Amino acid sequence: AGEVAARGASLGFDPISLNTEDRVTVPEGYQSQVLIRWGDPLTSTAPAFQLDAQRAAAQAEQFGYNCDFVGFFPLPRWGARVSTMGLLAVNHEYTNPELMFPDYVAGNPTQEQVAIELAAHGVSIVEVRRRRRGAIPFVPSGEAGVERWTYVVGSAYNRRITAETSMEITGPAKGHPWLRTSDDPSGVTVRGTLNNCAGGKTPWGTLLTCEENFHQYFANLDALPDDDPRKAAHARYGLPAGATERRWELYHARFDLAREPNEPFRFGWVVEIDPYDPSSTPRKRTALGRFKHEGATVVVNGDGRVVVYSGDDERFEYIYKFVSSGRFDPRSREANFDLLDEGTLYVARFNDDGTGEWLPLVHGAGPLTAENGFASQADVLINTRGAADLLGANKMDRPEDIEVNPVNGKVYCVLTNNTRRQPDQVNAANPRPNNKHGHIIELTEDGNDYAATTFTWEIFMLCGDPANPDDQAYFAGFDPSLVSPISSPDNITFDRAGNLWIATDGQPGTFRKNDGIFVVPVEGPERGYLRQFLSGPRGAEICGPEFTPNGAGLFCAVQHPGEGGTFAQPASTWPDGIAPPRPSVVVVTREHGRPVIGS
Ligand code: FEO
Ligand code: CA
Ligand code: CA
Ligand code: CA
């Protein structure tokens, strides 16, 4: 153990422990700083956050709620080797009105509260800058009282995209009859984006922001007749039979299926946004399929085609990838702007012998025919789940981030948990019944060809508490007595050495401890040696994470601090020490401005 402990210094920090403190904890030698909070003004005309003067018009110019994905885009242009100034693109997945409004009445919101919630959803684009080194005192191991990074109020790049922003539908499903509504009889223009969870960045410098649990916004599925095929399609995506919990349908016909039965078909897509052009129109890329997209991460294949991996985050749902028809052109950003409109979508089947296949979701192939309800490729893409069911893909334990490691080239698939899996439903790729802690699969495309239709795979990690034999935790064969306990992995990223960074969403439920960020080498003698790097405040999941290109800044989102409480009885008062808690983006830096890991 002494020898391993000595090697343990190789990541350069002493791991922290799970805790229940209402703050961000980082290792000795690092500091964390709140960069931007819910309600902070983005424009020079936006008011500062005022609890008792919340207005939808103000929220539409302020940082939104429940920040999730964080993407760093360098300035002054995509491709610049700059780590000190850039644009952060941040998703705002959903709202917690019971924490936002002192006078919120569950089931009976006011019209203005609903309007504020609509404006607090979506995406923020915000310019950020690192202040010059040396000018700022370093606060070791703590939350900084000084600002190492700042965001730029009133930057011409700053932008809010909300649940009301006009966007365009592109790709094979554009204009399909099921996408038409009374507001948009042609089925090409949608108001807004909803439940933007994780996402990705394209090689041409655009944001992919992913619509995840969109079902919760649409009321009254039971208003559709049983013989209407749209009813079965909506049911496959879990739309509620009657009223929603949020009750937006009280004030907006488009959230009521009795009045607009097609509106939900206009959500559940991957949305592409050019963060460098504040006047650009966001585009819903239907070729990537419609499901509860956690994220969408992109890799350029050896032959120039681009491949997008995406998980459908619900119990017993699937893992997908898209392979473009066209090829990436590194000489011109704009030449790539429509690459994601044409290509082939696949769904994964993991065989018990460690092999696997990508099954094409192509109209006319196999069972995807008109007799089975798929009369066109648009039908396949609008009801992607139903098409994948017919192909016999693997029902997984809630697929979250799927990302390619830029150092070893392997694909890491995060399965966050699935407590509903029964003992007779286990298979090699989902090996534990009542999987409360989740696991991570390491997938290798055959021939290292990301467009391949066959792959091999193995379990990299079975999460849990290594001290609890009931958890059957496994860390790529590494001595479990030396690793940190971890539960409910969600978002991942990689540092420049290819180490895997994992943010969690669920430890308050499984461990009665706060969520955090963990790092684990995937190659060499420390493969599987997981260590905890960060712990968040109470009730929050941790999202992002995202490094600056030089590795010296680590951005992460603190989402829904205080969840589980109410405004009157908050479970957290982070970050300001008073109610309400405020979802925020945090940046972690190291002494002397060194890279977070390595030198
Ligand atoms: Fe919004 Fe899959 O987490
Ligand atoms: Ca997530
Ligand atoms: Ca990620
Ligand atoms: Ca999650």
Image (tube, grey):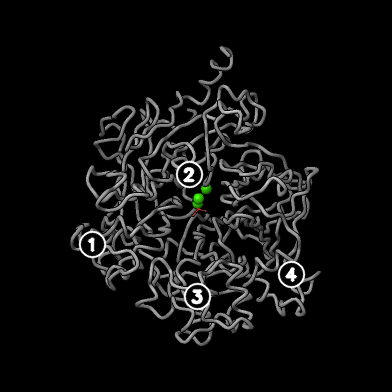
Mark 3 vs mark 4, CA separation in Å: 23 Å
The answer to which image quadrant residue 587 occupies is top left
Labels 3 and 4: the sequence-earlier one: 3
- Mark 4 or mark 2, whichever is nearer to me: 2
User: Which residue, given by chain and number where applicable, does mark 2 sit on?
Assistant: 506
Percent coordinates x, y for residue 285 in the rendering: 57, 69
Mark 1 vs mark 2, CA separation in Å: 28 Å
Question: Relative to 281, is 520 above or below?
Answer: above
- Mark 1 or mark 2, whichever is nearer to me: 1
Residue sitting at the far top: 2
Q: Residue 103 carries which label?
A: 1
Query: In the structure shown, which secondary structural element does the residue marked by tag 4 occupy?
Result: loop
Position of 90 with respect to 414 (left or right) is left
Question: Relative to 14, is 460 above or below?
Answer: below
User: Which residue, given by chain and number where applicable, does mark 3 sit on?
Assistant: 168
Percent coordinates x, y for residue 317 in the rendering: 63, 57
- C-beta proximity under 8 Å, tags 1 and 3: no
Labels 4 and 1: the sequence-earlier one: 1
Mark 2 vs mark 3, CA separation in Å: 35 Å
Image point (26%, 69%), residue name: 57
Labels 1 and 3: the sequence-earlier one: 1
Q: Nearer the viewer, residue 566 or 48?
A: 566
Percent coordinates x, y for residue 182 in the rendering: 47, 87
Query: In the structure shown, which secondary structural element does the residue marked by tag 2 occupy?
Result: loop
- C-beta proximity under 8 Å, tags 3 and 4: no
Give the residue type that dot 4 points to.
Answer: Val
- C-beta proximity under 8 Å, tags 4 and 1: no
Which image quadrant: the N terminus? top right
The answer to which image quadrant residue 51 occupies is bottom left
User: Which residue, given by chain and number where applicable, does mark 4 sit on?
Assistant: 362
Image point (63%, 32%), residue name: 472
